[in-house]
Image (tube, coloured by chain):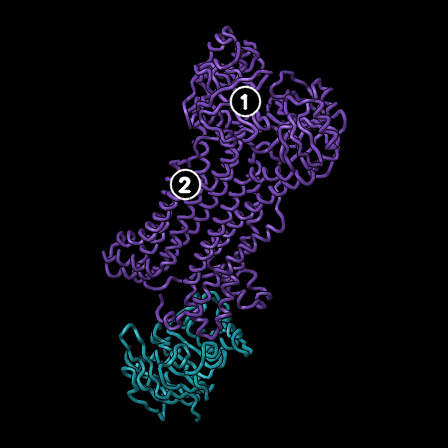
Chain colours: A purple, B cyan
Amino acid sequence: MSLSKKMLRDIKINKTQFIAIFLMAFLGIFAYTGIYAEYYGLVQTSDGFYTDTNMADAWIYNTDFDNASLDKINGFTTQSDRQEVIQSQADMESKPDITLHFIEKGTISKFYATEGEDFNPNDDSGVWLDTRFAEARDLKIGDKITFEFDNRTITKEIRGLGYSPEYIYEVSPSSLTPDFNEMGFAYLSAKAYPEDLKYNTLLVKYDMSDKDFEAKLSSIDYLSLTKKEDQLSVSKFSDEMAQHKMIGDVFPIVFILVTFLTLLTTMNRIVAHQRTQIGILKAVGFKDSSIILHYLSYSFWPVLAGAILGLITGPMIIPQMFYPSMKTNYSMPSWNPGFDVSFIYIAGLMVVLSVLVTYLSCRRISKENPANTLRPKAPNVSSKAIIEKSRFWNRLSFNMRWNWRDARMNKFRALMAIVGVMGCVALLIAAFGMNDSMAELKSWEYDDIVHYESKLLLSSQANPMELYYVLNETNGSFIMQQSIEIKANDVEDTVTLLASNNTDLISYTDSNRNPIDIDEGDVSISTKLADKFNLAIGDEIRWHIVGEDDWVTSKIGQIHAEPISQGLIMSPDTLKDQGLNFTPTNIITDEKFGENLDSIKSVTTIDKMKESWDQMTTSVMMMVYVVTFVAGALAILVLYNLGILSFTEMEREIATLKVLGFKTNTLRKLLLTQNIIFTSIGFILGIPLGFYFMTLMMNAAGDSLYYIPTLTLGNIALSAVITFAIAIGVNLMFSDKIKDLNMVEALKDVE
Amino acid sequence: MSTIIEFKNVDKEYKSGEHILKAMDNVNFTIDKGEFVVILGPSGAGKSTLLNLLGGLDSVTSGQIIVNGNHVESFNDNQLTEYRAKNVGFIFQFYNLIPNLTAIENVELMKDIVDVDIDGLSVLDSVGLGNHADQFPAQLSGGEQQRVSIARAVAKQPTMLLCDEPTGALDSKTGVLILNLLQDMSNNRNTTVIIVTHNAILAEAADKVIRIKNGQIESIAVNENPMKVTDLDW
């Protein structure tokens, strides 16, 4: 009873220390659970969405799935559903591209209605529309909408708005971020099709391995097969999640480790500092167990409180900082932070470990006999290191000698300070490095490679006369950008094809950002892809344009480097040599084009492209801010805590020096020197560690981006400024303590 | 003999809440250069307060403390620091050596605060510790540590040595050696030595004995023929 009073008073007296412990536990758990909750949220929400909508395991494409072939496939699948998937244009301003799905049953990859009715496969006059497109175009339930395709026109009434699991990510091959004003999807009943319907797509669910399934399927005639993980939306979203996971694997672990270490040192020190009091309690007859229990509560309550608060607020706050930017790029009905039992385990582990350390240091002291405990602990006896015997040593100032010895005699404290700073610096460097590398990619793409002012997206039913008119008007150049599927060395990937004549509007580059030419007749593959497929010049690849059936084999003639889109580059003539048609998808030009023509769907300016790049990278940038903030906060806590620890330990020495006549300034410098030396060592060690973290994360940054981890001197300097400002700032907090130190009190008793 | 220390009507009050504790009540005395002074009194009498005021660790409530003609009571923090550095050599009950520094380094540390060239080894020799110069405090016995602390105090050639129960933590045999050393400092080097203690035996060795009680001077006695510390009946 009286001991708990003692604890409350101790906490009151040492409140900064206990607040620091509380904050450390809080911050560590907050960052850890918050960042993971964001990642688990993505996984759980998308998994839930896939499950709710019964997402297909694979899509089989053919010109027509008749009942006979369907029966055969049904023999080894658990579920199937036929669709006719057609590209159409909605009859409205700028003719946006809408992918129509005419659906037989609506049992697989179901439309997820958030407004209006659920999808009804028997309703021949309704349409269920992409809610993002509807928002962009201000369409409501009950509105009529007309689609044009293959010279047919159908008009339907909007019955429902919502999402589809196949369109979490929807974007055209020629742009980086979705433009919901220009594209969308719509689900309709097969009965809504104007005439006899042939199904070109079969959605299936199966309960065997992909390999077995492909083996079974080989007996069936079909054009192509896309498995779930290869589907564009699925793979793009899992790339995004992989990046978040990698960030989540690096940062929270560093946070938690730094927190653990600092927490443990602190608890150890607090108990050591209470040594004489433990002796007194023993001497007056308290049992060891009640003394230990008393000190256990010192770490238990603040760490528990901090961990619980972090556990609650981390998952609540951090994911909400990321989801808004995720929502602009991806479409899902809900975005909820995830929770995992491991959060509770980590929080529990933190509490248990701090209690354990307190227990160990407490037990060590209580094992000594009370008389011993009442005396101050004998300082570590040290022998002289070689450096201390040299002549050089005697020439060192008192400041340097004192700090050297202090570090030697308090190795653990020194180590903690260095490791703490190192962790924080590594986080800062990694965060800034990501920032740098993103900026580097942007400048590589938009300064070195892209020299055109505008990119005109051509309508698929463009009028050739109009196109040549535009080409002449703008002095532009045709390019073709298509998604292609590529196979080599048993690896498959969906990438981008760019067919373009040599033009001043696009420069190709090598990995050093130097301009290169792609020669006539050469098929050039991007470095990142060549690495992934393990290909060299002269090797062969097989590929086809997505949606077309002709596979071609090409020999790699060159390798180029491209920061933001991976794939093949060749000239239109080379494309024709491969037996494929050059069908321009865009016109690029250095001039502005403002005319409103049916053949031109949209015009994207370079500024808009940069904007969409920025939009695409917001979530990474958000991560950079969060990490910078938490690393900074952690650095303050680590340094303040270690500062206050060493100050309490050295209080008597400092008081003595002050009594002897040392000036406050000299003493302040003494502590500052120590602080700066530890910080410097931590800083220097933190740079390579941070660079390593950065490389880890970059590697997981998604397949389409080719990162070169970059670290500018400016950012190293910025990290240095932040770290040292914190170190010096923390030191200033102690200056007043030195000034106000009561010499008489500090010298009075041994404690 | 010249007076170098003078307390004039010194009052010192400690306030804790509404309660006022009068630790020094109208204290007056003088000390001459080179005197070996013992301040005696029961615990709580105000001995340490007196020493702290004289040493510039604490400030008076009213009255004057004149050292070498300077008014210590009017000094600000920086002047007090300078005063301590130049005039006062402290010797504490618990030695208060810097544990991170060797014996000789503890002594030569004084070079950093006063403009005196200090040969640490010869100072340590003078307290009989020349052969322990490179040891750390933790490697020395209590008596040896106290001798290092005396060496540290005299190295800067202060106006006075202020010793607060310098033998309090030592056995009596070692204590005598320490006190003898301090008496020698006074006799041979003409250093003013002021010792605070509750051990009345030491009074016979002092040039001047100041007895205090309840914050007031009880008596001031001058010994015409002080005994040698080693001759006292311990």
The disc, 2 or 1, on the residue closer to the chain's N-terminal end is 1
Q: Are marks 2 and 1 in contact (CB under 8 Å)?
A: no
Res. A534 visible in picture? no
Report the side of A9 relative to A485 (left or right). left
Residue A413 placement (x, y as % from top left): 46, 56
Task: Choose between A418 and A211: the one closer to the eye.
Answer: A211
Q: Amino acid at mark 1?
A: Thr
Chain containing mark 1? A
Q: Residues within 10 Å of mark 1 (few under 14, many from 20)?
A: some
Total numbered labels placed on residues in the image: 2
* Chain where mark 2 sits: A
Residue A439 x/y as whole percent: 61, 43
**Left or right, B41 with reference to B174:** left
Quarter occupied by the N terminus of chain A: bottom left
For the residue pair A332 and A457, the one nearer the viewer reads as A457
Residue under the image location 52 percent in, 32 percent down: A136
Q: Amino acid at mark 2?
A: Pro
- Identify the secondary structure beneath mark 2: helix
Q: Which residue is mark 2?
A: A315
Q: Residue A99's mark?
A: 1
